[in-house]
Each structure stands twice: as structure tokens, then as C-alpha cells.
Image (cartoon, grey):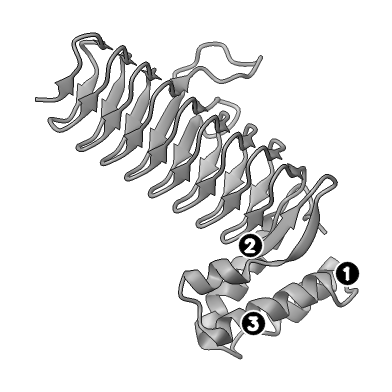
Amino acid sequence: MAQIHPTAVVDPSAELADTVTIGPYAVIGAQVRIGDGTTVGAHTTIEGPTTIGRDNRIFAMASLGAAPQDMKYRGEPTELHIGDRNTIREFCTFNRGTVQDVGITRIGDDNWIMAYVHIAHDVQLASRAILANNATLAGHVHVGDWAIVGGLSGVHQFCKIGAHAMIGFQSHVSQDVPPFMMVSGNPLAVHGFNVEGLRRRGFSAERIAQVKQMHRLLYRKGLTLEQARAEIEGLRGQLPEGDADVALLLEFLAASTRGIAR
């Protein structure tokens, strides 16, 4: 049976796996499902409909699955989905989705989410990302795998942050940040690409060199965006192991709706 502290309040309709641990004074609402091995810290509140996967560590005072902070919300049954093995530190706030979008706020797997992070309605956070203390993602933001968002940074609604991108401390993100790029400041500026992150993830020297070339084409050659896209397209086939990186960047640029940070 789940280990539930006697001071916790758990709705009878909540579905808790046998190895879940619920800490003191936590409140687990109706339509909440929590998977094996997940721990919920003291005074945390989880409202439904919310689904949480396996082996997550949720620390004290988090608020997960509350209604979206959207004035158009009229009580529709939207959801929050959290994957597996995420670390969610103190005082984080994750809101459910809205019917104006897909209706589900999604958190992937293996994310490291530090204290006071806010994830607003309809955010789509992929996997293995790091969100430092007080990072704030507004509604409808998309964040790719392995991305890093620095502390006290704010991301404007509908922005996209590409895989392997890095957002520096206290940045104001109001445009899309392409994969691999390293940005910071207010106004936001590009300061190279995330070479150290790629090394840590096992990218070969050849792949890193190709990413560097894509960065130069996009930001250092004085090309228009369309010219840069055409030049990056020309890199296909030159390094077979890097074709996926080329495709990742080109697909991101094609899907950008707010323009890219330049």
C-alpha cells in the first residue's frame, strides 16, 4: 500500500501506486493518478485531472495541476501530465492546459526543475531539461530536449526553445531560440552555441564542428534567414551522423512563429 502520512488529505478517487509516498499535510485531489516510486513532499497540493508517472521526486510546497491562470478559462476539464524520474523542487507551480490549445500541459522525463519554477498552461516541456530557480514559462511555451533555462529568466507565451539550447541567467526570452544556441540578456542576444553541453552529451568533434558551422551561417555571415536556411540545407550528407542535427535546426526554423533570437 502507498505510504500516506496521517496528516495528509487524499481524495478517495485518487489512484496511487503501491510504492508512492505522500508526506505530511500534502493534499491529493480527485482525478489524480501517481505512479510507482514517486514521492510527494510535505504541504504539496496536487489537483486533478493530473497524471504523474514513476519515480518522480516532488519536494515540499509544490502546487501541481491547479487551474490555468487564463482569464478565458471556464472550468473545462483540462489536464496536467508529468512523465517519469523528474525532480521537482520546492514551491514549483505547474498549471493544467486550456481548450484554446491541446488542453494538456506536458512534462516529459528526467527533467531537473529547481525551486519556484512556474510552468503555465499548455507548456510542452520535453525531457532532460534543466530549469533553474525562478525560471518562468508562460502559456503555450515549448521547450526541447536537453534545454537549459537560467535562473530568474522569463519566457514569453508561445515562444519555442530548441533542443540543446541554453538560456543564460535573468534573460528575457520574447522570440524563439533555435536548437544548440546559447543566449542571454534583455534584449536577448545570441552568444555562440552550447558547445560544452554537446560535449557532455557525447557529440563527436565532427558533429560539434558542423553545429558550429550552422551557427556561423545563421549568425555570423550576414545572411538573411532564407539564405542561411539554404546554406544549412547544403550541409546535408556531408556528415551522416550530423544529418539529424541539420534536420533539427531546419525544422525548428520552419516552425518558428515569433521569429528567432538574432
Residue 194: which quarter of the image?
A: bottom right
Which is more N-terminal, label 3 or label 1? Answer: 3
Please name the residue that numbered disc 2 is placed on. Answer: 179
Which is more N-terminal, label 2 or label 1? Answer: 2
Residue that extends furthest to the left in the rendered view of this protein: 1
Q: Residue at x 55, y 53 (%)?
A: 144
Q: Residue at x 59, y 45 (%)?
A: 142
Amino acid on which disc 1 is placed: Thr
Which is more N-terminal, label 3 or label 2? Answer: 2
* Quadrant for the N terminus in the image: top left
Please name the residue that numbered disc 1 is placed on. Answer: 224
Q: Residues within 10 Å of mark 3 (few under 14, many from 20)?
A: many
Q: Of residues 160 and 59, which is closer to you in this image?
A: 59
SS state under label 3: helix
Mark 1 to mark 2 CA distance (whole Å):
18 Å
Please indicate whether residue 259 sits to the left or right of residue 58 in the image. Answer: right
Q: Residues within 10 Å of mark 1 (few under 14, many from 20)?
A: few
Q: Is residue 233 above or below residue 87?
A: below
Please indicate whether residue 99 sits to the left or right of residue 256 in the image. Answer: left
SS state under label 2: loop
Mark 2 to mark 3 CA distance (whole Å):
13 Å
Position in image of residue 100 (x %, y %): 60, 27
Q: Nearer the viewer, mark 1 or mark 2?
A: 2
Q: Are marks 1 and 2 in contact (CB under 8 Å)?
A: no
Amino acid on which disc 3 is placed: Gln
Q: Is residue 205 above or below residue 109?
A: below
